[in-house]
Amino acid sequence: MNERAVCTISLINEAKVTAVKNATPEEETLFRLAETFRVLGDPTRVRILHALSLEELCVCDIASLLGTTKSAVSHQLRLLRSLRVVKYRKDGRIVYYSLDDSHVGNLLREGLSHISSQGVSP
């Protein structure tokens, strides 16, 4: 039988609604979280982040790895930096990029784990 998962009565559990409402982050926090997930919605950026989860790399390294231009990589890195997903350090004239913190790597690993658990190879 093909039943739809829809409530057929109107019953609100006030205790649960209040508990969830009290545990919900502020709008600004939710906005920043959505922005973080939005930035992960682009395959090129995910490839960059995955590479940076394995090694600290410069723009030239990333461009070579992705088979694209330094300009295209720089554009993506600028966006990732503005959202505090990646950070950089200078060593002489070379700028090296890495993930901003371990949380970004954790997001990538969790996402890959989720995909793997669904029977799709990463």
Image (cartoon, helix red, strand yellow):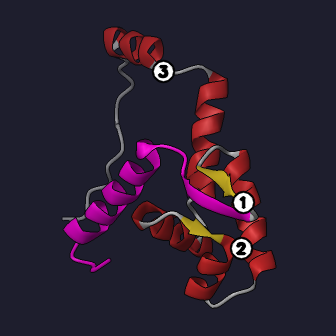
Give coordinates of residue 32: x percent, y percent: 64, 36
Q: Determine which quarter of the picture holds residue 80.
A: bottom right
Do residues under tags 1 and 3 come within 8 Å of each other at their CB atoms?
no
Q: Give the range drawn in magenta.
A: 94-122
Q: Does residue 12 lie above or below 67 as drawn? A: above
- Total marks placed: 3
- Compared to residue 24, the image places residue 80 above or below, namely below
Give the alpha-carbon distance from disc 2 to disc 3, as whole Å: 36 Å
Residue at numbered disc 3: 24
- State the residue position of label 2: 73
Instruction: Give residue 113's position: percent from left, percent from top.
Output: 26, 62
At mark 1, the secondary structure is: loop
Q: Residue at x 40, y 18 (%)?
A: 20
Give the secondary structure at mark 2: helix
Q: Which residue lies furthest to the front in this view?
A: 92
Would you name the residue on which mark 1 appears? 92
In percent of the image, x 39 and y 25: which residue is there? Answer: 10
In the displayed structure image, the side of residue 91 where residue 23 appears, left or right: left
**Kind of residue sitting beneath label 1:** Gly
Kindly check if marks 2 and 3 are in contact, taking CB atoms under 8 A apart as contact: no
